[in-house]
Amino acid sequence: MNRIRDLVAELLAFSKFTGEGGLALTDVRVNDLAQEMIKFIEPEARKKTVKINTELGATLPTVQWDPDRIKQVLLNLLLNALQATDQGGTITVSSEYVEEGPKDRFVRLAVADTGVGIPSEHLEKLFSPFFTTKGREGSGLGLMTCHHIIDQHRGSIDVQSQLGVGTTFQLNLPLDPRAYDRRKAERKRLKPEELVL
């Protein structure tokens, strides 16, 4: 019954994300937002003796995002990383400004862990409804919700993982979703040499 209750709560939360028009876009300082979410999970990380490193860009522009929804994405990714990482492991949160053209300007956020990794056959299913690698502990809605929120912001979310080495989730988000035509942009997957583990 508790599992059903939790699942219904997650479905109700997901149903509130009704499209781009529902975003509460406002000025966001990306590194401040990331630091806030890191502080939120630091007590649990200390209990597990997992170290959280930061590699935050020093010259990030202010962006127009929905802070509450991006916080939800970061918190979900950080909690997943913490769950996947054994004692003594590390989680690295990084940010950088990326300019691929006059109108293609992004902030790239990444959450990388030194955890157990994800089997390659599961990578393509990670953002599918109800798919989970956590057994009875997972609902399969967390990453689906993350994907939806990033999609609302006209961004992309990519994942690379290696068993026994770790996993990296990378978010590429335009500075202002309203001014970005995603159809003209290419969604790139991480190359192995770009992984931060």
Image (cartoon, grey):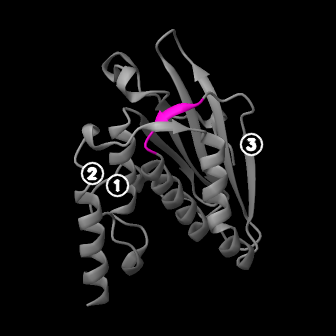
Quadrant that contains the N terminus: bottom left
Quadrant of res 82:
bottom right
Q: Amino acid at mark 1?
A: Thr
SS for callout 3: strand
Give residue 148's position: percent from left, percent from top: 32, 47
- Dot 1 or dot 3, earlier in sequence: 3
What separation in Å lies between label 1 and label 2 (alpha carbons)?
9 Å
Q: Of the residues tagged 2 and 3, which is closer to the observer?
A: 2
Task: Name the residue tied to disc 1.
Answer: 145
What separation in Å lies between label 2 and label 3 (alpha carbons)?
30 Å
The image's mark for residue 17 is 2
Determine whether label 2 and label 3 are within 8 Å by CB. Answer: no
Mark 1 crowdedness (10 Å alpha carbons): few <14, some 14-19, many ≥20: many
85 with respect to 46 (left or right): left
Q: Residue at x 69, y 49 (%)?
A: 197
Quadrant of res 14:
bottom left
83 up-or-down from 1: above or below:
above
Task: Please give the range of residues in magenta.
Answer: 62-66
Task: Name the residue tied to disc 3.
Answer: 55
Q: Residue at x 39, y 19 (%)?
A: 185
What separation in Å lies between label 1 and label 3 (alpha carbons)?
26 Å
